[in-house]
Amino acid sequence: MPEALAATPADFVTAPISLRRRITDYLATGAAVSAVIMVLVPLAAVFGYLVYRGIGSINWAFLTQTPKPVGEAGGGMANAIAGSVLILLIGSTVGVPAGIGAGIYLAEYGRNRFGDLIRFTADVLNGVPSIIVGIVAYGLVVLVQKHFSALAGGVALAIMMIPTITRTTEEMLLLVPTVTREAAYGLGVSRWRTTLSITLRTATSGVITGIMLAFARVAGETAPLLFTAFGNQFWNWRINQPTAALPLQIFTYAISPFDEWHRQAWAGALILIVLIVISISAVRIAASRGMLKGAN
Amino acid sequence: MTGPQPVEPMEVVAEVQSAPLIKMGGSLWPDRLFSWAMLACGVSVLALVGLIIFELSTKSGLSWHAFGWRFFFRSEWDPVNDQYGAFPFVYGTIVSSLLALILAVPLAVGVAVFITEMSPTWLRGPLAFTTELLAAIPSVIYGLWAIFVLVPLLREYLQPWLAKYFGWTGLFEGPPYGIGMLAAGIILAIMIVPIISSITREVMTAVPQQQREAVLALGATRWEMIRTAVLRNARAGIMGGIILGLGRALGETMAVTMVIGNRAEIAKSLFAPGYTMASVLANEFSEASGDLYLSALVEVGLALFLVTIIVNILAQFLVWTVTRGTPARGNA
């Protein structure tokens, strides 16, 4: 007797949803979609305009010459590109080992209160505005040396790299199963050797990803270089001298009133983005092919 | 490079045979040295933060003794007569950051809702990646773009329109320069959207699937499900993401310096130029002559540092309250 069943499950499912609720649902969906569009528009605008203005302005002179005096056409940012490379090298030389070491400490020795303190401090350091890091590097290096220098810029960037590398290294090392470590201990391998040759080596690609994130983050940093590396119109390869840097040069040119310099600022910005993207993808390709497996 | 695979196991085998026999006892020192070296690296993180606090507080002592708390409520900034008050910078920092939040929060939450709850699966990855890409663009490039694209757009279109229809509020008065508080707020908003939206996505993903299913089973529409099951459960974490965005906006330097106009004035209109704590450091620090001038700037830096630290700690705590139950993910 089907009539006896007063309400089948189908009756609940087809119970009408009121018009008001349906309209609200459509409106919410529409709002979310338009939010996505409104976020993608500036992204496309920034990238599109960057490529549009940048491509036309990059030429051989730009890549090989130093800046010309105001009013003269031509010249380039070769010294700024070289300066950025120098500062980033100094920053990585200091920041990468320290960051990896701190990450190893947290993962292998720091499962305690003291480790928590360091973990927390690293997160705090990560949130410090870059301009503040610049002030500190100024006090530490520039005031001691009595002049602006590439070294000071490198130190500022290193301070910014350390917390990122520390936290990612720790996380990647923790992903390595304990069994792997125990297997090494069981074979009589000492603890330091296990950490370096087994644990760190297993986590290499993840650790490199962390380094590359930190690198990409500091490569475009301008604020901490303003009063550390300071900028320079000429070539400089000495680490105790003021040095030009690509982001600094872009800043100086962007706020200048000259069209020629504006053009070069766009070219510099495009180069900066390309440098960041290239360094990221090169490391990623190398890591995925296992070329860096023995690097430690 | 032809056959790296077979080589590695052989090395290990060699070690198995030699290591335990040779290293019976007496091999503690290398281990100890290594752990000390790693400890030193870990302590260096503590030392860095200690160093920042030390540097900032000692170097700002002069200004602190000269002005005390009044420093933050005085409006004159006069290097010639050695009179310093940071109020215009504090005001500019707060207004530009709040403006950025007002613009960015609805967009960021909308993007996060779309990516986690509405988007077809194939679109999810690319969309998440693209919004994250916004975070990889250096600040100085945002500033460059803002000077040559955003500011002219504001000057020609948005500002006249706002002045015409909303001029009565007093927020949109005066000559439309383009450069000013409004431009700074908009560029900051673009820069903090990825942060807020990635945190929001993280906490929304942490909401258990059963919550969604339960609400849907009660006959809720999709939006009702998102509102009652997802957003309500994740609200503390979303708040954390918003505060994290605020922290970034407060300390953001280059892009703001390039478009805010850099004038230590307090005006009601958002069209007027302003100045922020980070920009005054960027512009004046390397030229600061005189001990009190430098000290006053460092004190601005100290205040900025303390505020961003407090904001960040609060944000991390809020995010943690939502995500603590879920397994750790890639990005902490």
Image (cartoon, helix red, strand yellow):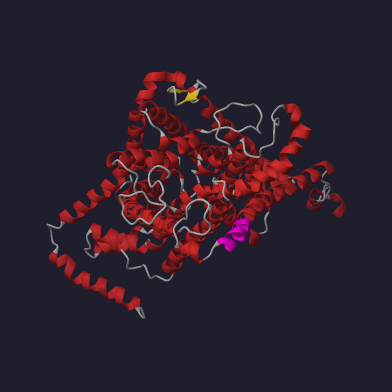
Identify which residue is drawn at 36% across, 63% down: A202
Residue B28 higher or lower than B76, as above or below: below
Identify which residue is drawn at 22% across, 60% down: A190
Image check: B214 left or right of A243? right
Image check: B67 left or right of A3? left
| Of the pair B1 and B209, the residue shown nearer to us | B1
What segment carries the magenta color? A47-57
- Residue B272 lies, in percent from the top left, at 63, 32
Identify which residue is drawn at 36% across, 81% down: B2
Residue B206 higher or lower than A205, as above or below: above
Question: Residue A48 magenta-drawn?
Answer: yes
| Of the pair B122 and B42, the residue shown nearer to us | B42
Of the 4 image quadrants, the one containing the N terminus of chain B is bottom left
- Residue B9 lies, in percent from the top left, at 30, 74
- Residue B319 lies, in percent from the top left, at 51, 41
- Residue A257 lies, in percent from the top left, at 57, 46
| Of the pair B84 and B239, the residue shown nearer to us | B84
Question: Residue B192 magenta-drawn?
Answer: no
Please indicate, yes or no, whether residue B207 appears anywhere in the rendered image.
no
